[in-house]
Structure formats: C-alpha cells, structure tokens
Amino acid sequence: MAIAELRSTITATAARDTGIDFVRALCVLGVVVLHSLMVGVTVTDTGPLFANASDGSWWITPLSWVLQVMPLFFVIGGFAGYTSLLRAQQRGGTAREFVAARIHRLVLPAVVTIGVVGVALTVLLANGVPADLVATAGYRYGQPLWFLGVFLLCQVLLPLFAAAHRRAPWITIGLLVAAAVAVDAVRDATGIDGVGFVNLAFVWLALQQLGFFFADGRIDSLTRRTRTVIGVAAVAALVATFVTGVYSPDLIANINPPTTSLLLVGVAHTMVLSLMRDRLAAWSTRPLPTRFRTFVTPRAMTIYLWHMPVLLAMAGASAVFSLTTGMALPTPSSFEWWMTRPLWLVTVVALTAGLALLLAGIEARRIPTPTRSAKRLFAASAIGTLAIVGLLVVGTTPMTAMIAVALLITSLRLSRPRHGLSAAWPSRRPGSDATSARAMQNT
C-alpha cells in the first residue's frame, strides 16, 4: 500500500475509533487494578509496615500475563498520536503545535497532583508521622511516575519518528529494536542492571513505532492468517525466553528496567487487537462500554496520576484503623487478604473515579497559543522530563515535590509564546486553528 493511499485511508476514517478508545480505557483500569493488588499493609509491634504485596508471591506471574498492559498502551499511544498529527497537519496544523499540546496535556495535571502530594507529605511530617513512613509513601507515590516521563518523551519525539516512519518504516523500527536488544545484551554481559534503564527510551519508542504501523493500515492489510501466525510466534518466542532463563516469566519484573520481552508482548497484543478490531468497534458502542470509555478517555491522565495517592491514603487509613481499634490486618497474599480485595478494589476505583470527575477539567483545559520556537519546545520537553526523573531518582519529598512543580510550571511556560497566553491558536488558513487544536488535544 502506497504512502499516499495510507494517508487517504487515515483521512477517510477521521472519526475516533471507539474500539481503540475502549481498549485504552481498559488498559488504564488494568493499571489501577494491578497497583491496587500490590499494596500490602500490616501493623507490627514496631508500627505500620507498608510493602509490595506481590514481592515473592506466586500469583504475580500469572496476573502479569493479564495485567501487563503497558506495551499495548504505548502501541495505542503511537496509533492515536500518528493519526492525530497527520490529520492536524492536513488541516494546517504543525508538528510544533502537536508537541506543545502534548506537553500541556501531560504536564498540567501533573503539576496539580505533585503539588498536592508535596503538601500532604509536609502535613504528615508536621503532625508527627515518622519520617521513614513519610519517605516510604513518597517513594511509593513516585514509582509509577516513570510512565509520565517516558510517555512525555515519546510523544514529544513522535513527529520526528513519524516522519522517519513515512520515509523508512522498516529501517526505523528495526534500528530501535536492534538498539533495545543491544542494551539487554550489554546488561547481561556486564551484570550492571543500571544499563537496562537506557531501554526506557528504545523499548517504548519501538512500541510507539509499532503503533504507527497499526495507524497507517499496514498491519490490518495483512491476512488474518498472517497476523495470527505473527501473534503466535511472538508468544512462542516469549515463552522460549522464559524457559531458557533469558527473561523472567513475571512480566512486571521485566518493566524495571524494561527488557525487549516487552516488545514481544506488544507484538502479540497488537495482532490480537487487529484481529478483533471490528468486533471491538461494534461492542464498544453498546451502552455500558460507551459510558465506560467516554468517562475514562478524557480523564485518562488524571486517573493515572491520582490512583496512587488514593491507594496511599487508603493504606494509611487501614493502618490507623488497625492501631486505634486493635484489629489485625490480614497478611498480604493470605486467604483472608484475598477475601478483602474485592471491597478494596471497588473502593479504589470509586474514589479514583470521583477525583477524576472532580479534577478532569484540568486535563481537558485547552492549551493557549503554543510557541513556534523549536528551542523553547526542546527546553520545555527537557525540563519537564527532568522534573519527573528527579522524583524517580531522588524520591518524592516536600522539597523535591516543590522543585518538580517549579520545573513543570517552567516547562508549561516555555511551551507558550513569550508575549502572553492567548486563548486561540495561530491560524494557518481560515478556520484551521480550532480544528487543528481539537485534533491534537482530543486523543
């Protein structure tokens, strides 16, 4: 299929793909459920103990095969970003506007969340909560923020890699995959796990690149038999890496740092998604799936950013309840603990949904006029990423949260022009500003 034909196909299907939106919403829910099951709270003679309930447990491996959705999330992110960018460019928008919109959409809600968490940690310390418990809470909060930093990086680089995909699709993704494999090889040869963190770029960029193949129709143009064979081969290769000891069968363990096993997961997920795309599109328009996806889609980042503070607050409340009533909390992974998980999950989802309903206006706020300066956008991207990396490396404390908020606000300001914050986008031709703004924001 020629590039011109692929572009016309994307233009002809300008309406949102409700099936893809539904799957993305399921991915968000899957992340919330997975993190909820990792929370372990016990109270000992020395005080509360907060730990990862999945550490050393038997159930995390089979569960990871169901709930390790991050590869699919980045594939869908590539799909959505590629189609959004191309449509907006066809309406007169620019790649710089796309990048500015992504910075705004991802960074703005993070400023609020990190700021609130920083204040909460300060209040806990001021009220005599032991510093080690506050440090644990800050550490647990900061762990999932890797996604924000990496997704921001991938989306900022998306126009560059989309252009490379249009010129040389197979060479581009091949180089990314080869680089990811090379990083794993060096890590294995040297025994230095820190080397693997380089794959925070290569693995997730390769998965985003796979989403471009899904967006331009190349994957769907394959026969069903070919897609089935590719999917089965990816799973078989994945199992082979487990059997030979190359990678852990726990797919969650393969995310920190990320390994190339996640590429195989992403390929398998993409083939299944492609094979089921028509059914998903039809099913996603039914009343219940429609309500679910229309609630989650515009609030996805808000849900992701707030579900961990909700979990930490619930963990703290559980410890306080046990200390004040004398009732023992069930041991993580015990039968009694599993019996409490349904109520725990329902509570997490309900509280997170309530916060998302209350705060989603922040995420949905339309970006003011984006800057046309490539240097300012580069600086905005670098500073925003640095803020998140700082929280991950140093930990979330009142001080680091304050610094991160200051850096993120600087990132937002740099993504806008120096002269002010106009409510309208610059127009390339009559009527193009509003349509391109909606196309870039509504993904």
Image (cartoon, rainbow, N blue to C red):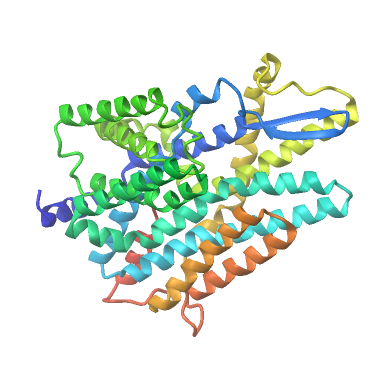
Residue 247 image offset from top left, x and y in percent = 43, 32
Does residue 355 sit above or below 269 in this rendering? below
Residue at 66% across, 25% down: 343
Residue that sits furthest to the top in the current view: 335
* Left or right of 91, for residue 399: right
Residue 420 image offset from top left, x and y in percent = 51, 82
- One can see residue 25 in this view: yes
- One can see residue 299 in this view: no
Does residue 167 sit above or below 174 in this rendering? below
Does residue 149 sit above or below 274 in this rendering? below
Q: Nearer the viewer, residue 247 or 408?
A: 247
Q: Nearer the viewer, residue 185 or 45?
A: 185
* Displayed quadrant of residue 326: top right
* Left or right of 204, for residue 358: right
Residue at 35% across, 29% down: 238
Residue 253 image offset from top left, x and y in percent = 51, 34
